[in-house]
Image: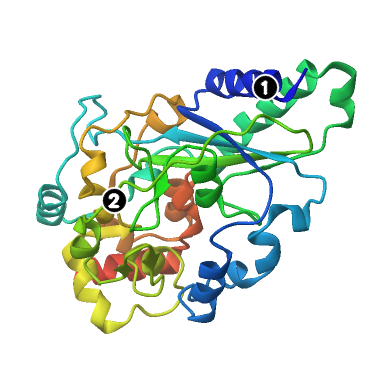
Amino acid sequence: MDAVALARVVKGLARGEGFALVGIARAGGSAYGDKYREWIAAGKHGEMWYLAEGVEERVDVTRKFPWAKSVVCVGMAYWQKSDGSSQESVVSSQESEVSSQKRGMGRIARYAWGRDYHKVVEGKLKRVERGLRKAMGEEGAGLMARVYCDTGPVLERELAQRAGLGWVGKHTLLIHPRHGSWFVLGELVVSVELAADEAEGDHCGTCRRCIEACPTGAITPYSVDGVKCLSYQTLENRGEVPGELQGAMREAGFLVGCDICQEVCPFNGRPLVATEGDFLRAPVAELAVGEVLGWDEGAWDEATRGRAFRRVKLGVFKRNAGILGGTT
């Protein structure tokens, strides 16, 4: 099959796995290479040391995989209401914060409500890979491929933009022009040439809602200071949360992650609702601050098993809960 026919096959396989967004980018150097190097040099990655390793491989996938010719980029919707209904309206940040705080609850960023998305997306992409090999017949035996989801040496948002899935917004998240930004992304790097899609243009315009709503001022246009970001502080920082950020953390009410920049984005007014069963099964939208403070290793293990927020270890969970509860 030629590049057009193979691209059609791959897209059909990906949609069959439940990916709402599918596109193809040519493997090669990133247009964001210089900006990424500047971001690292400014120390905005904080303690995320892995982001500073293999920079040249990260900004050009062919540096690590010389055989790479195409990258299949996918997006899976994860937005859902906290009560499990499918009503397509975003709960306002202010309403969520007030409700949670009154009940002594700490909010969980939406991407982490269901089963660990890394495992879900990677499993589906491996099935897409197997389907592509089968469709290629005898040539499929020689196919080289790698699967990623929020890991590995790829700038996934930039690749997704090149693949036509959306554009990288001022808050640095990928935004689809109709469906917004409530997606987890994944990539299938392959050694076969597939017909590439056209890149999506920027539609942020003069909007500054995400910049103005960020409780710590971490966002400047098309850049985020990771050290100031509440997602970084609640997930990546293993030490003390700086005193000047603790008040913002209490005001936002997030125990794990932060969704504020997405909640205020006008493109998220009518989000695409999640359909993946692993995301919808027994969602955890919030946790009781008092209970977290009383956790031991066994309670932490039970509460986090199989979920994306398991990477937040017991000590960090209790530190975050102490800040929200005003005991720290």
Image quadrant holding the C terminus, namely: bottom left
Q: Which mark is residue 204?
A: 2
Q: Which mark is residue 67?
A: none
154 w.r.t. 3: above or below: below
Q: Could you say which is closer to the camera, residue 30 or residue 189?
A: 30
Image quadrant holding the N terminus, namely: top right
Task: Give the x, y percent position of residue 45.
Answer: 49, 72
| Residue 327 seen in the current view | no
Residue 214's image quarter? bottom left
- In the picture, measured across the screen, residue 122 lies left or right of residue 95, that is right
- In the picture, measured across the screen, residue 122 lies left or right of residue 35, that is right
Helix, strand or loop at mark 1: helix
Measured in 3D between alpha carbons, the distance from the residue under mark 2 to the one under mark 1, in whole angstroms, is 31 Å
For image coordinates 50% across by 57% down, the residue present is 311
| Residue 65 seen in the current view | yes
177 w.r.t. 170: above or below: above
Label 2 neighbourhood size at 10 Å, few (<14), some (14-19), many (20+)?
some
Type of amino acid at the residue the image marks with label 2: Cys
150 w.r.t. 179: above or below: below
